[in-house]
């Protein structure tokens, strides 16, 4: 029982790692975002003002938020249908479904973008079939746009959100459905009045995971459109790497804005969940 | 000099005073039980002897040596836990060999000690089994074997049977006692089950709220409780305030009195025995508890509990009039 | 109830189809020379032969394996050491470790590598070594998964009781933690390790940001091939996807084995 503190040595590697590659980089980025461009010291809000006033970056913010929120909502709706279906039907199909979800959750980034290119790209299979058979919608499919990107984002949101929601449905007990039926409720009243409210915390936390996932996603957008799309991660990265003039202070401010969005999503979700008292 | 001695042990968890100046001596070879409800400090005292908890102040002596600040690994104490705590990745044999290997004993001796321990707990043939393939009772036997194979100075058993179902518990109680008698190992057993304590112990120390309320042999503790807690925890005594017992018996009492329910005799007609206190009452209700019927009787507005064997001649109905008698020596002043 | 079940089955089948179509198209595209009408024409394995005979491909796969394994091993060891302290000696510190291990969620994707890059490009050697930065950044990215895996398994097996039991048999706390507890949680932790492996294996953004052209991993190779040949790109995607699947399959089987193990423990 001697109070020798040598065991504290075991904590050092962890602390060194976190301090050097987590805390200092983040803090440095936050500080740097307030430094005037091209200078070593000083304080300014100009970097932030630029982000929110210059149309190029305003557009990036709007695009990023739209694509993150839309892809999360669509992903959630599909996930809800899928998880509810798993909840209602037991058997082999469920196992197959789970395996496929696990499998395709690895299919993202560059490979996913390319799969969409060979389907709907300029010389994609669907595009060719569309022009051969005069199907306008396929022939002129707008893949290289925010809409096309949204399609890709929805694809990688679905397996993630379904895998997160399936366990939540375990909380729905059969007796509640039976009581609902005995009290004269329909299937619809059950889900709107009981099921969804009970699942709300899980739905909200899944939403915040999806939102953060989409907001920070870079590889698919980059593979599809290089730097020709106005999204925050793309705008962020090009301030540090690539052919353009590098603007690290301004880029730091973009990074901080992204972090704030991420944290806000988590905080809002926590607030909502706590308020409901669940 | 006692084999194990706790000197003025105090233990605080923050502001919570869980052991309040415990002084306790244990003789070599004894089977000692620390009995009490959960949260009374009995496990904490055991764990402080093991070295798994540090005491806030006080001294622990084992075999003439002050071990208060020693590491658990240097105390040579064996311990069996409620949750068995067998190493799931090791076979029975490997579990038993674990401590012996750390002691760097020669291979032959390890082998010899293991087979002896396995024989004692009657698990021959299970040497190569993994804990997950054994029943709860078997796992607890392995834990026991793992404790004794180290030939410790003292064996500690921390509620080892509370996770085991009632039938098996009885037989394990007997085997633990047998193993103790065979090896003569000083054993300290912690339980909240008074029946278990009665069956197994040489000496019982009854704990309540961080202090030892009473120490003695099972018979002493059972028949002569010294505090109202002891009386209520052991044997479900009737406890009467001085004025109430005076009203019941018609004589004067200076203290509270405890009376065991089974010492109260019940009959349908008045008894003519002048040595006993006599009273009349009405049966309020009755509950069957195993082979015993527990009656609640209203004696002039005072509730009295009395036990009768199920098979006894006279069975009373609720609302029936009953004559009670109590021998004076069964009224324990507390 | 019956129609309900049929509806559920239909929903599952539709989602499965939606998810599998891009994968299936990629696979078919890699196996045929031409696909400009409903049916592809002229089956061939040339694309696969080409990449399998390309030493650059093998080198990049080798680099990916290396860059996945090193940070995962180091990260697991570092977190185990930290948990040794917080689990046994300082449980009140666990919440701070947990916070440190949750922060990476808020700097997902492109954010963390950019923060690291902007800080370390101007510092002296060896800290600006790209490989060193890459490995360290990966360690932070997988930190949440490794931490969760270790923590859940520690609580799952009741590690504190095992440590006490080992101590009573003459083991030090350190020995008890690393020789008794760690072997018992390793099965469970391997699941998290495999998950982390799949994440690092599929990473493009971090390696592209931090190492650029200096360290060509399989994902970077894929990005290069993309500009040259569609068919070969699809073949690379298929091969990499199969490797990722094998990694997750390992995790899955370990998990199953573990569950079966605990099932046995019940009766």
Image: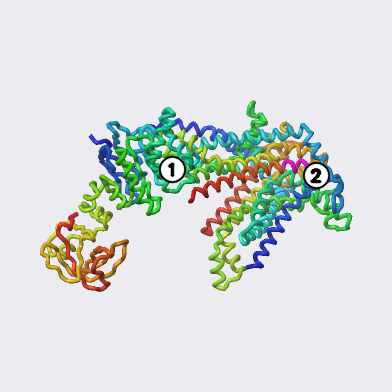
Say which element carries label 1. loop
Residue B73 as seen in the image, left or right of residue C136: left
| Proximity of marks 1 and 2: CB atoms separated by less than 8 Å | no
Query: Cα distance, mark 1 to mark 2?
Result: 55 Å
Badge 2 is on which residue? C30
What secondary structure characterizes most of the magenta part?
helix
- State which quarter of the image contains the C terminus of chain B: bottom left
Asked if residue B176 is among those painted magenta in the image, a careful observer would answer: no
Counting the numbered discs, the total is 2
Q: Can residue C97 be seen in this view?
A: yes
Badge 1 is on which residue? B85
- The picture places residue B9, in percent across and down from the top left corner, at 29, 40
Above or below for B244 versus A36:
below
- The colour scheme is rainbow
Residue A81 as seen in the image, left or right of residue A110: left
Quarter occupied by residue B296: bottom left
Front position in the image: C30 or A133: C30
- The picture places residue C112, in percent across and down from the top left corner, at 64, 40
**Part of the protein shown in magenta:** C235-240
Front position in the image: C205 or B53: B53
Closer to us: mark 1 or mark 2? 1
Residue at the image point whose x is 81% and y is 51% from the top? A120
Chain letter for mark 2, please: C
- The picture places residue C177, in percent across and down from the top left corner, at 48, 36
Q: Do labels 1 and 2 share a chain?
A: no
- State which quarter of the image contains the N terminus of chain B: top left
| Residue that extends furthest to the front in the rendered view of this protein | B125
Chain letter for mark 1, please: B
Residue at the image point whose x is 54% and y is 43% from the top? C99
Residue at the image point whose x is 63% and y is 54% from the top? A207
Say which element carries label 2. helix
């Amino acid at each position: 029982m001697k109070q020798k503190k040598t065991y504290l040595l075991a904590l050092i590697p962890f602390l060194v790692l976190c301090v050097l590659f987590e805390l200092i980089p983040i803090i440095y980025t936050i500080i740097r975002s307030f430094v005037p461009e091209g200078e070593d010291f000083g304080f300014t809000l100009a970097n932030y003002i630029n982000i929110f006033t210059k149309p190029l970056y305003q557009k990036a913010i709007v695009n990023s938020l739209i694509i993150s929120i839309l892809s999360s909502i669509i992903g959630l709706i599909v996930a809800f249908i899928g998880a509810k279906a798993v909840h209602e039907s037991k058997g082999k199909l469920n196992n197959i479904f789970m395996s496929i979800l696990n499998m395709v959750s690895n299919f993202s980034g560059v490979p996913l973008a390319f799969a969409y290119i060979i389907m709907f790209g300029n010389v994609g299979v669907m595009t060719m079939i569309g022009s051969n058979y005069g199907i306008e919608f396929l022939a002129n499919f707008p893949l290289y746009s925010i809409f096309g990107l949204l399609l890709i984002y929805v694809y990688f949101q679905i397996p993630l959100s379904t895998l997160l929601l399936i366990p939540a449905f375990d909380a729905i007990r059969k007796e509640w459905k039976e009581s609902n039926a005995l009290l004269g409720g329909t299937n619809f009243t059950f889900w709107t009045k009981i099921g969804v409210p009970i699942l709300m915390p899980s739905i909200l936390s899944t939403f915040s995971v999806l939102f953060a996932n989409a907001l920070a996603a870079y590889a698919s957008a980059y593979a599809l459109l290089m730097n020709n799309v106005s999204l925050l991660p793309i705008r962020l990265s090009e301030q540090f790497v690539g052919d353009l003039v590098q603007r690290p202070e301004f880029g730091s401010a973009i990074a901080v804005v992204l972090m704030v969005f991420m944290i806000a999503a988590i905080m809002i979700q926590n607030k909502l969940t706590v308020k409901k008292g669940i | 000099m006692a084999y194990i001695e706790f000197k003025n042990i105090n233990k605080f968890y923050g502001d919570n005073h869980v052991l309040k100046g415990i002084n306790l001596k244990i003789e070599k070879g004894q089977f000692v039980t620390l009995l009490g409800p959960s949260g009374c400090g009995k496990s904490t005292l055991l764990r402080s002897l093991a070295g798994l908890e540090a005491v806030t102040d006080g001294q622990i002596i084992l075999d003439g040596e002050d071990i208060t600040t020693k590491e658990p690994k240097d105390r040579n104490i064996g311990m069996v836990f409620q949750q068995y705590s067998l190493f799931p990745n090791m076979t029975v044999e490997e579990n038993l060999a674990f401590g012996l290997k750390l002691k760097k004993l020669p291979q032959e001796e390890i082998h010899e000690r293991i087979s002896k321990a396995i024989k004692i707990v009657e698990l021959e043939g299970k040497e190569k089994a993994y804990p997950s393939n054994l029943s709860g009772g078997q796992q607890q036997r392995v834990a026991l074997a793992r404790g004794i194979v180290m030939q410790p100075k003292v064996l500690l058993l921390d509620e080892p049977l509370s996770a085991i179902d009632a039938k098996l518990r009885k037989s394990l109680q007997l085997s633990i006692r047998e193993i103790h008698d065979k090896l003569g190992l000083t054993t300290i057993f912690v339980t909240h089950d008074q029946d278990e304590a009665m069956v197994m112990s040489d000496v019982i120390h009854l704990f309540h709220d961080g202090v030892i309320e009473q120490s003695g042999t099972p018979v002493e503790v059972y028949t002569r409780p010294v505090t109202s807690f002891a009386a209520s925890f052991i044997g479900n005594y009737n406890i009467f305030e001085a004025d109430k017992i005076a009203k019941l018996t018609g004589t004067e009492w200076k203290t509270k009195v405890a009376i065991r329910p089974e010492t109260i005799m019940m009959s349908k007609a008045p008894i003519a025995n002048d040595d006993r206190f006599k009273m009349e009452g009405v049966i309020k209700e009755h509950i069957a508890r195993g082979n015993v019927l527990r009656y609640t009787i209203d004696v002039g507005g005072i509730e009295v509990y009395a036990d009768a064997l199920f098979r006894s001649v006279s069975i009373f109905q609720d609302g029936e009039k009953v004559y009670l008698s109590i021998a004076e020596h069964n009224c324990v002043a507390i | 109830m019956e129609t309900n079940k049929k509806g559920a089955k239909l929903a599952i089948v539709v989602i499965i189809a939606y998810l599998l179509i891009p994968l299936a198209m990629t696979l078919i595209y890699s196996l045929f020379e031409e696909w400009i009408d409903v049916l592809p024409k002229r089956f061939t394995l040339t694309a696969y032969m080409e990449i399998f005979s390309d030493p650059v491909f093998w080198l990049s796969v080798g680099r990916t394996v290396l860059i996945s394994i090193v940070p995962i091993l180091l990260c697991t060891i570092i977190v185990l050491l930290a948990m040794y302290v917080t689990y046994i000696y300082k449980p009140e510190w666990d919440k701070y470790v947990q916070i440190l291990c949750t922060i990476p969620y808020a700097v997902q994707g492109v954010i963390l590598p950019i923060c690291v890059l902007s800080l370390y490009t101007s510092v002296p050697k060896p800290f600006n070594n790209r490989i060193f930065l890459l490995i360290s950044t990966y360690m932070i990215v997988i930190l949440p998964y490794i931490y969760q895996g270790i923590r859940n398994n520690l609580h799952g097996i009741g590690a504190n009781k095992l440590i006490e039991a080992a101590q009573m048999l003459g083991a030090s706390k350190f020995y008890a933690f690393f020789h008794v507890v760690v072997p018992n949680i390793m099965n469970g932790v391997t699941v998290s390790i495999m998950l982390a492996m799949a994440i690092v294996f599929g990473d493009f953004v971090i390696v592209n940001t931090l190492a650029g052209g200096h360290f060509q991993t399989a994902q970077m190779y894929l990005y290069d091939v993309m500009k040259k040949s569609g068919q070969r790109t699809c073949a690379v995607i298929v091969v990499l996807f199969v490797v990722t699947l094998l990694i997750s399959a390992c995790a899955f089987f370990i998990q199953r084995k573990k569950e079966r193990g605990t099932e046995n423990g019940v009766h």
